Amino acid sequence: MSRVVIIPARSGSKRIPCKNIRPFAGKPIIAYPIEAARESGLFSRIIVSTDSEDVAAVAREFGAETPFLRPARLSDDFTGTGAVVWHALDWLRKDGEQIDAICCIYATTPLVTAENLRAGYALLMESKAPSLVSVATFPSPIFRAFTVGEEGRLKLLWPEYYRVRSQDLPEAYHDAGQFYWAIADRFLTERKFYMEGAVPCKLPRYFVQDIDTLEDWAYAELMYQVLHHAKKLS
């Protein structure tokens, strides 16, 4: 049995053109998750699922495999990660690969580390959970959040927490958008990483940054430079 990582990397990003292979701190951004996966020593195969020959060529240059091109029906703006990973896992199984655990790392995660991937896998095994999601805490208490009503007036989302001290509020986490683990058989059945009984891999907030806009990109490069200088990244 083996462990496999799938890195989804479709073409066609609108807000950041050629996002998955755009240079980030000196090399294509997809190189970072590929290199972290290789350094972790966890995986028998590192698979990039893409619909683009250009992305596939870059992925292979940095040590990943691209044994298939993702079909068009799984390459639009509405296809979720679960469907893409399920397709790759199903393809590998039909090709004869015996897989016990599967990992997904997003292509635009330059702050992912081999150490955190190993910690996530160890936690999955120790907990005997069906899946694991990397998470981080919100920078401020979400239970004090506002919304804006139809007349432009502020409204508390949870007014019952208004007078509760911040240190007494429930701690809340969000999906770090970095990596996921699952037992392969369970994933084939459920087709998602957030399953009943999933466990969290808690990451420090300084490892977590969504990259959806050019401003996000610039901020992530600054974070990378600081973390690299502080030897938090290899």
Image (spheres, rainbow, N blue to C red):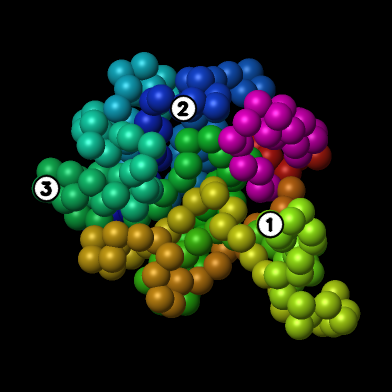
Residue carrying label 2:
13
Residue span colored magenta: 207-229
As shown in the figure, which amino acid type bears the numbered disc 3? Lys
For residue 150, the mark is: 1
> Residue 143: image x %, image y %?
74, 71
Callout 1: 10 Å neighbours few (<14), some, many (20+)?
few
- Mark 3 vs mark 1: give the one in front: 1
Q: Is residue 126 left or right of residue 44?
A: right
Residue carrying label 3:
94
Mark 2–mark 3 Cα distance, whole angstroms, equals 30 Å
Q: Is residue 229 left or right of residue 178?
A: right
Q: Earlier in the sequence, mark 3 or mark 1?
A: 3
Vertical placement of residue 189 versus 62, above or below: below
Q: Is residue 45 left or right of residue 155?
A: left
The local secondary structure at tag 2 comes to loop
Q: Earlier in the sequence, mark 2 or mark 3?
A: 2
- Mark 1 vs mark 2: give the one in front: 1
How would you classify the magenta stretch by its main secondary structure? helix
For residue 115, the mark is: none
